Amino acid sequence: MNYDPSVFYVCTRPKTYFQDSGYEEHYLWHARALGIDPKNFEVCYLPDQRLPANVEADLVIIGGSNKSVYDTEPWIQPLEQFIVRLVQEKKPVFGVCFGHQIIAQALGGTVEPGSFGPEIGLTEIELTKDGLHDPLFKNITPVFDAMQLHKDIVAKLPPVEVVVLANSDLYPNQALAYGDHVRTVQFHPEITTNIMETEVNEHADEMLRLGYFSNKAEIERKTAALQDNTFESTAQAIYRNFLKMI
């Protein structure tokens, strides 16, 4: 791709959340990881805004969330319908964490809490035979570290054309391909060590409530273990490979 693409970003937190907390908006993380000017992003803040009938942007990104896809939030079903329409229209879509899960659920898959508990921090990802040949992972080593922050997983694949591209030691379905236009990953290619440390430290109480950690001592151990910065360049290379596909 020889131009800066336009991006429609689905954010599952209201804009007031970022304004009131002084927290950096998540779409900026994605913009930096992709090397795209943030001005190219149009953000839809659920649940305050409605999803459009048509998306003119070059691609759609559905990011992470503090909600689960099986929650009863009133915007979940409209988002699923939105996803189905995008897939039918062959619009390029990239799903990250919650986005990875909601795309699978929208297409008929099953998402549930992981039986081995949350994956948090750096974990080892291994490409499948299909993943080794998928353009999303071009020039990526067969095994690499990725940043994780999730408690739910895609437990059952949807009954559509879907290919598993990567797994982790704990959970399968870490990266999925739906035809030529849709890619999803359970891990976070947009999160750096600094972001992870800030996210964990500023939202420790919420993470404890949601079950990501059992106690604050565990939080301290996890953040102290974030020493490897080499994963960031790998993650960004994976993310930017997607731009070459559209």
Image (spheres, rainbow, N blue to C red):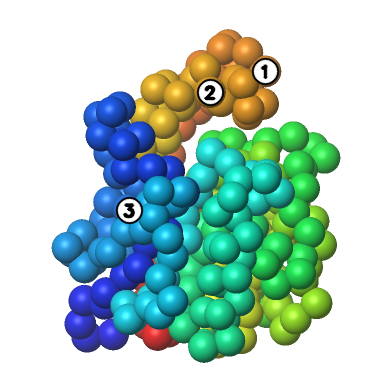
Q: CA distance from mark 1 to mark 3?
A: 29 Å
Say which mark, if any, is on residue 206.
2
For mark 3, give the secondary structure.
helix
Q: Nearer the viewer, residue 193 or 45?
A: 45
Q: Is residue 44 left or right of residue 106?
A: left
Pointers 2 and 3 in contact (C-beta within 8 Å): no
Disc 1 crowd, CA 10 A, few/some/many (<14, 14-19, 20+): few
Give amino acid for label 3: Tyr
Disc 2 crowd, CA 10 A, few/some/many (<14, 14-19, 20+): few
First-in-chain label (1 vs 3): 3
Residue at image point 56% right, 25% down = 207
Q: Nearer the viewer, residue 47 or 203?
A: 47
For mark 1, give the secondary structure.
loop
Give amino acid for label 1: Ser
Q: CA distance from mark 2 to mark 3?
A: 21 Å
Looking at the rendering, in which quadrant would you find the C terminus?
bottom left
Q: Nearer the viewer, residue 166 or 21?
A: 21
Give the image quarter of residue 243: bottom left
- The x, y position of residue 120, in whole percent, is 59, 36
Residue on which the image places disc 1: 214
Camera-near label (1 vs 2) is 2
Pointers 1 and 3 in contact (C-beta within 8 Å): no
Residue on which the image places disc 3: 27
Q: CA distance from mark 1 to mark 2?
A: 12 Å
- The x, y position of residue 242, in whole percent, is 43, 75
Give amino acid for label 2: Glu
Camera-near label (1 vs 3) is 3
- The x, y position of residue 97, in whole percent, is 56, 53
